[in-house]
Amino acid sequence: MIKDKRISQIICIFIYAISFYLSYLLLPESISYIWMKITLWHIYATLFVYIGSVILKNSSLYDPFWSVAPVPIVIYLAINSDNSMLLKILVTFPIIFWAARLTRNWLISWKGFEHEDFRYIDLKNTNIYKAEFNNFFGIHLFPTLIVNICLYPLVFIFLNPIEVTPFLYFASIFTFMAVVLETVSDEQMRDFRNNPNNKGKTMKYKLWKYSRHPNYLGEICFWFGIYFMGLSSNLAPIWIIICPLSMLALFIFASCPMMDERSLKNRKDYKEYMEKTSQLLILPPKN
């Protein structure tokens, strides 16, 4: 097992670079629709990262993929767009800000390959065949497909002749502020955890007083912001609402319950906090 954090990060970066490069080379030249190319690239890269996680026996290799993969996708779309530089900046800047924020979190919190996310361990805590099924489909491929689906609204804003509208300004600012909400929430939690006196206690102050998962709320709002960007083109069909709704469902039915269940096991005061505090929305605590 590789225990050194710096070496673990270097290995992770190397695997990602190789995965992205080889995946791009494998793209069939016969495919003309740009989103099909992007989807295949996304899936191929996930397969290479999965192979790396199997070799290293640690699925946390996939963790930064969530935030890293959208960056080359968005840049690729921007390069292939004939729209104005202002439009490209309004769309790409909040996304790169989001990716930088999540990647920074990973760099700070990841301990290296000696550590694996508890959710991954739980999913693989079964027989060998089901564990590998969960590893590939549940930990690697499914999140990739969700992110890919949620990025799809960008096609309508990048690949059509679009003027910058007030609605696009709103969508860009909304997306940016969603990342700010995530960042502030994470910093508040990080400060709380860094205080030794808070060990075993529940964070129920500042934003966390009004929501059990304000950072997840910011993440969900970020993906709705991308949806709003797509809508600003006035060309996006109504059905693309399923893009951000799929992300909302992932957090409501998977991420939030798993975090709550873990906190209930580890913190005696969490049950009372859970009963009084909204799961996602920032609301006054119940009496």
Image: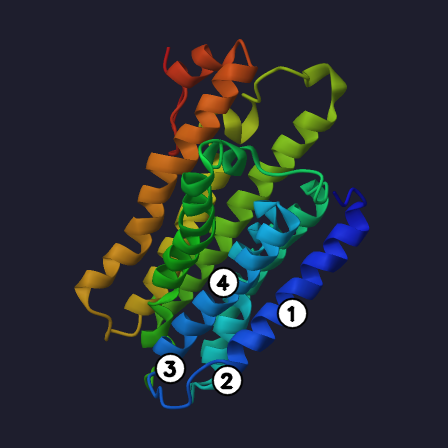
Residue under label 1: 17
Residue under label 2: 79
Residue displayed at 65% across by 50% down = 56
- Mark 3 Cα shell of 10 Å, populated few (<14), some (14-19), many (≥20): few
Which of the two discs, 3 and 4, labels the residue nearer the N terminus?
3
Q: Amino acid at mark 3?
A: Ile
Q: Amino acid at mark 2?
A: Ile
Q: What is the spatial separation of the Cα atoms under label 3 and label 2, in whole angstroms?
A: 12 Å
Q: What is the spatial separation of the Cα atoms under label 4 and label 1, in whole angstroms?
A: 13 Å
Residue displayed at 35% across by 49% down = 247
Mark 3 or mark 2, whichever is nearer to me: 3
Tell me the quarter of the image containing the C terminus.
Answer: top left
Do residues under tags 1 and 3 come within 8 Å of each other at their CB atoms? Answer: no
Q: Nearer the viewer, residue 282 or 237?
A: 237
Mark 2 or mark 1, whichever is nearer to me: 1
Which of the two discs, 3 and 2, labels the residue nearer the N terminus?
3
Residue under label 4: 47
Residue under label 3: 34
Q: Nearer the viewer, residue 199 or 26?
A: 26
- Mark 2 Cα shell of 10 Å, populated few (<14), some (14-19), many (≥20): few
Which of the two discs, 2 and 4, labels the residue nearer the N terminus?
4
Q: Nearer the viewer, residue 130 or 251?
A: 130
Q: Amino acid at mark 4?
A: Leu
- Mark 1 Cα shell of 10 Å, populated few (<14), some (14-19), many (≥20): few
Q: What is the spatial separation of the Cα atoms under label 2 and label 4, in whole angstroms?
A: 26 Å
